[in-house]
Amino acid sequence: MFNIFYQLLNEQKFADGGEVKTKKVIRRNLPINTEYKIIDSFYTGGISENPMSCDNCGKLIANVAVVENTDGDKYHVGMDCAETLSGIKDSLEFIATNNDFNEAKAIRAKINNAFKKYTNGKLEVKNLPDGSVKLEYEDEGNRTMVRVYVAKQWFNKFLPDYKNKISNKDKNDFYPKFDANYDFNFNFETLRNFVDGKKVNYIAPKEIKVGDYKAVVSHEPHTILNDDGKAITNDTYLQKLYDSSGKLINEDTYYMWRDIQHRIIWEINQYEFNNFNK
Ligand SMILES: [Zn+2]
């Protein structure tokens, strides 16, 4: 993996004006006549569970910054040591890495506090179809005490200590193909049923391609069952979603044209997520 330097505090004795003083200095293992930058960072899982040794000072560390110098040499160091390396302290990467570690620490603290306060509660850690991981702590009355969503790549790097708590581990490697920035190459404004406050005609079925999928959206009166099981008819959007073989995989109705774009992405991701590792 990487070199572990067993470099502990050195006691350096030197004479000064006739009397002997003792000064503790931290031996630096990393070359100093070069510039560094942070190229990666991660949490090891904990200082007692899975510590690493700082390549610079030898201390045990859990928050690890991977730094690279101008010669291309890479080292694993703690943030205290990273800060002392030339080129790092005022860099955006240093600020961002500190933020990541602080955020992870805050999430850990929230969960630990909830565990202490509501001892009979339970923690749920779950992969979601949008590529995020949800961490939720509920007390024994199923009230949510903590709920956070983090991106999976971020979770893997900064909260790996919760990885074994994931309830749907079979979805650990799932990453959605489509996100909110997906370019549909389709003008969703053409689906508006109100323009400048005036109702326009019902909208005939329109095809929207998303990768190998196809969504067909129309706007017309649709009859749906309300919560009491009564049939009610409303002007709604009907969205049908087909896979590459033309099989209908989802059908849903919405009131707002603005919802359609996100719903298409959500439904496709949900479908692929459900079928992942099946
Ligand atoms: Zn160090």
Image: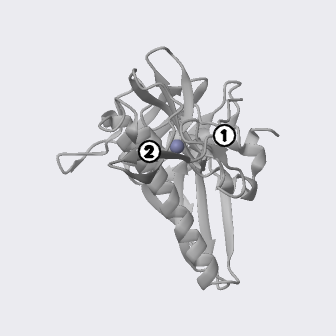
Which residue is at a point 53% across and 27% down the rendered structure image?
210
- Residue 76 horizontal/vertical position (percent): 57, 35
Farthest front residue? Answer: 18
Q: CA distance from mark 1 to mark 2?
A: 23 Å
Side of 32 where 252 appears, left or right: right
Numbered label attached to residue 6: 1
Which residue is at a point 47% across and 24% down the rendered structure image?
31
Q: Is residue 210 above or below residue 101?
A: above
Q: Amino acid at mark 2?
A: Phe
Front tag of 1 and 2: 2
Please state which of residues 248 and 156 is positioned toward the viewer in this rendering. Answer: 156
- Res 229 seen here: no
Residue at disc 2, secondary structure: strand
Please state which of residues 212 and 11 is positioned toward the viewer in this rendering. Answer: 11
Number of callouts in the render?
A: 2
- Residue 114 horizontal/vertical position (percent): 58, 77
Side of 77 where 125 appears, left or right: right
Q: Amino acid at mark 1?
A: Tyr
- Res 65 seen here: yes
Please state which of residues 133 and 179 is positioned toward the viewer in this rendering. Answer: 133
Residue at numbered disc 2: 14
- Residue 63 horizontal/vertical position (percent): 55, 48
Which residue is at a point 63% across and 77% down the rendered structure image?
115
